[in-house]
Structures are given as structure tokens and as C-alpha cells.
Amino acid sequence: METRGDLIKKGIADLLELPRDIVLDLPKITLVGNLQLYIENHKGIIEYSTGLVQVNTKAGILVVTGTGLTIRTIVVEEIIIVGRIDRVEFLQ
């Protein structure tokens, strides 16, 4: 559910032509084929196994399922997941 503050931030982002992901603290997700997933602006790992990775974000829990999943990189702003990625979805 969007708060009044989020609506104001959206308006400012649109007015100033700023990227919404930065202004609203939203994750930026880039999928490279079905082999690699970049997640920027995350809030940490919730669960991790070779078949499932759950990442906390402001937009909800990002669930990645697949085979042979590994976290190649994890830093404050970015996570890189590699393996065969079958599904990416948000849980609210």
C-alpha cells in the first residue's frame, strides 16, 4: 500500500525526471537470460539454498527459484545470483 509520502516522492521523481527506483528506494532487477540475476537496492537475504533464494526488498520479498543457484556476489547495494533461473516473483 502506498503512503502519502510515497505518492509525493513519485510526483517529485516525475517532475524532476529522476529514476523512481532511486527516489522510492525500490529494487532494480536485471535478468540476463535464465543464467544470472542482478538485484540492486536490496534489504538482505531471507533464505538461501541451491533451489531457492529469497531477498528482502522495499517492494516485498523477491523469490528466485531454479537449479544450482549460487550467490556470486553480495554487497550492501547488490546481489548477483547465478545458476538456472526458472522463476522470479514478488510476495507482498
Image (tube, rainbow, N blue to C red):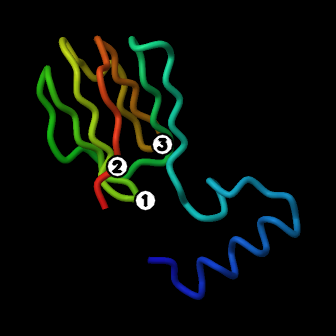
- The disc placed on residue 59 is 1
Identified by mark 1, the residue type is Ala
In the rendered structure, are the residues bearing label 1 and label 2 in contact, judged by CB atoms less than 8 Å apart? yes
Measure the C-alpha gap from mark 2 to mark 3.
19 Å
Q: Quadrant of residue 47?
A: top left
- The disc placed on residue 77 is 3
Q: Which residue is mark 2?
A: 90
Residue 81 in the image: above or below residue 56: above
Residue 75 in the image: above or below residue 67: below
For residue 34, side relative to residue 91 (left or right): right
Q: Quadrant of residue 13?
A: bottom right
Measure the C-alpha gap from mark 1 to mark 2.
8 Å
- Residue 62 % position (x, y): 32, 45
Residue 10 in the image: above or below residue 58: below
Which of labels 1 and 2 is toward the front?
2
Mark 3 crowd level (few <14, some 14–19, many ≥20, 10 Å Cα): few
Question: Nearest the camera: 55 or 77?
Answer: 55
